Image (tube, rainbow, N blue to C red):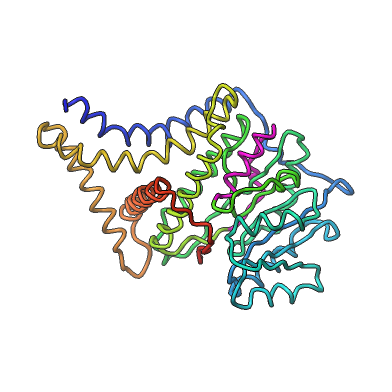
Amino acid sequence: MSVTIWVILVLLPVAFGLYGYVGYPALLWLGARWRDAGNGDGAMVGDEWPSVSIVLPAYNEEATLEATIENLLELDYPRDRLQVLVVSDASSDRTDEIAMSFADRGVELYRLPERGGKTAAENASRFLVRGEIVVNTDASVQVDPHALKPLVAAFRDPTVGVASGRDVSVGTQHDRNVGETGYVNYEMLIRDLETAVGGIVGASGCFFASRRDLHGKMVPQALSRDFAAPLVAREHGYRTVSVPNAVCYVPRTPSLGREYRRKVRTMARGLDTLYFKRALLNPFRYGIFAFKLASHKLARWLVPPAALVAVPALVVLAIQQPWARWIAAISAAGLVLGVLGLVWRGPSSPPRMFAIPAYILSSIAAGVQAWGKAIRRERSPIWEPTRR
């Protein structure tokens, strides 16, 4: 092959990465200066507050469930308009017992007869929720006491079908996965910009809300409901917004190993979800939403397989072209720093010069594995929660 072809192969991951992580946000920023769609973040008073059902899927969450339920019961929202429903995914520990201990405070328990995964648990709740607005959350997170009202207030805008909370990543100085916090903050910024130009393309799985009729739409259990929810909303003429004041505190995954497994699972399910709803990538029918879906999700997800192709191409170029040797040397240095971050065993978190390359390297490797699972159609509907 000619040098030009090798250069293109080397530049593919750079092009996808620069566009997905820099170019696309820049375009959103420019668009936000000309258009303000709002985020629906307002207030309702008195009798205007709608009824809300909080769905809490749980699989063997005895370590965190009691604190999580207490957290939900303390949310600033009219108690007579709040339903808390724990859906046990055939838990084998004390999860069911703990949930039932809150029955006198109005908490309800529904147990799946056999394990089906998180989406299956959320699907089962469709027949049990009574609220006009349905909130999905996780047993491993803590919702800010004042987060629910801003989230629900977003629905005063009749064009809003789904509202997503703001993730705040929290951890300790001993975590090996400090790069996650920076990425979460970056992702929240992108969602704010997307909201300003119409709406977001993916909700926070830890804390998001839907109108009851949208929550009632069946989602195949191998897919991600938090990603599918905005897609379903768009299909039915609604938009999805990010609500900055609806804060949810998400414990940082303490190790890159756990974060790696979480990313593989999340991206593989995301690819399956995008394929299932691939019609939404049609710009002639869905306009700017299709553009945002391709830019925010697909462009980023193409970086790992493109990087896999770029490595041998760069080796070939380095043999032939002196300038390519400099690129190969810089890439090798980044690889070494990433590996050092991965194997870091110090008493505290690795320095950023190691932590950031390690996070990037782990993310690329997870992406390659996720593509492999998606191509082989390896579905993983059975849910194994990330223990944070």
Q: Is residue 231 above or below residue 125?
A: above
Magenta run includes residue 226: yes
Kindly give the residue lying farthest to the right in the view shown: 47
Q: Where does residue 296 sit, x and y in percent of width and height?
A: 49, 36
Q: Quadrant of the N terminus?
A: top left
* 168 to the left or right of 106: left
Q: Is residue 77 above or below residue 240?
A: below
Who is closer to the viewer here, 226 or 284? 284
Residue extent of the magenta highlight: 223-249
Who is closer to the viewer here, 165 or 228? 228
Q: Residue at horizontal 57%, vertical 26%?
A: 288
Q: Where does residue 310 sit, x and y in percent of width and height?
A: 25, 38
The total number of labels drawn is 0
Q: Quadrant of residue 196?
A: top right
Q: Where does residue 13 sit, x and y in percent of width and height?
A: 32, 36
Magenta run includes residue 336: no
Q: Residue at horizontal 25%, vertical 50%?
A: 335
* 74 to the left or right of 335: right
Q: Where does residue 34 sit, x and y in percent of width and height?
A: 60, 22
* 81 to the left or right of 378: right
Who is closer to the viewer here, 55 or 280? 280
Q: Residue at horizontal 16%, vertical 37%?
A: 326
Who is closer to the viewer here, 116 or 26? 116
Q: Residue at horizontal 59%, vertical 45%?
A: 203
